[in-house]
Amino acid sequence: MKAWSNMLRGISGELEIGRVLLAGSGVTGITSPIAFQITDMIHNGYHFDVTAWCLAYPGGLAALSGIGVFAIGKKDNAVAKAKATDAATQAIAP
């Protein structure tokens, strides 16, 4: 369980809203299309469109996770550079 908790923590060791939202949206992104498809199948007489499912589902999930992971990685990189710059300035200051 500690690994899951560490995954939601940023470079400073605190929980980050971006990581928590990405994890929550990932779970929602995986489960909601399944729920919508089941609802549509019940409403339309259990007709399942395999082509539409296989074309739409992976692309949407990849876009959702890719954008979130890129944004979090870019922020972590900026924080690491800022900490390095701060440490270098503190070492130079008398």
Image (cartoon, rainbow, N blue to C red):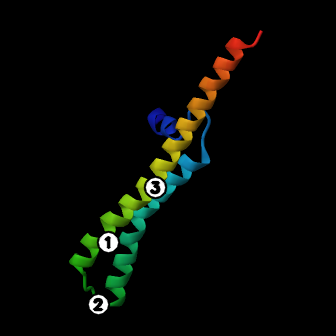
Q: Quadrant of residue 38?
A: bottom left
> Mark 2 belongs to which amino acid?
Gly
Disc 2 to disc 1, how far (Cα)? 21 Å
Q: Nearer the N terminus, badge 2 or badge 1?
A: 2
Residue 56 is marked as 1
Dots 1, 3 in contact, CB < 8 A: no
- Which residue is most to the bottom? 44
Q: Which residue is mark 3?
A: 67
> Mark 3 belongs to which amino acid?
Ile
Disc 2 vs disc 1: which is toward the camera? Answer: 1
Q: Would you say residue 9 is visible in this rendering?
A: no
How many other residues sit within 10 Å of disc 2, few (<14), some (14-19) or many (≥20)? few
Placement of 29 over or under 82, stated as above or below: below
| Residue 11: x %, y % from top left | 56, 32
Question: In what quadrant of the picture does the C terminus appear?
Answer: top right
Question: Residue at image x 25%, y 81%?
Answer: 48
Q: Nearer the N terminus, badge 3 or badge 2?
A: 2
Q: Quadrant of residue 47?
A: bottom left
- Between 21 and 85, the residue placed more toward the observer is 85
Position of 26 compared to 56: left or right?
A: right
| Residue 16: x %, y % from top left | 60, 43
Position of 9 compared to 42: left or right?
A: right
**Disc 3 element:** helix
Q: Which residue is mark 2?
A: 45
**Disc 1 element:** helix
Q: Quadrant of residue 42?
A: bottom left
| Residue 36: x %, y % from top left | 40, 76
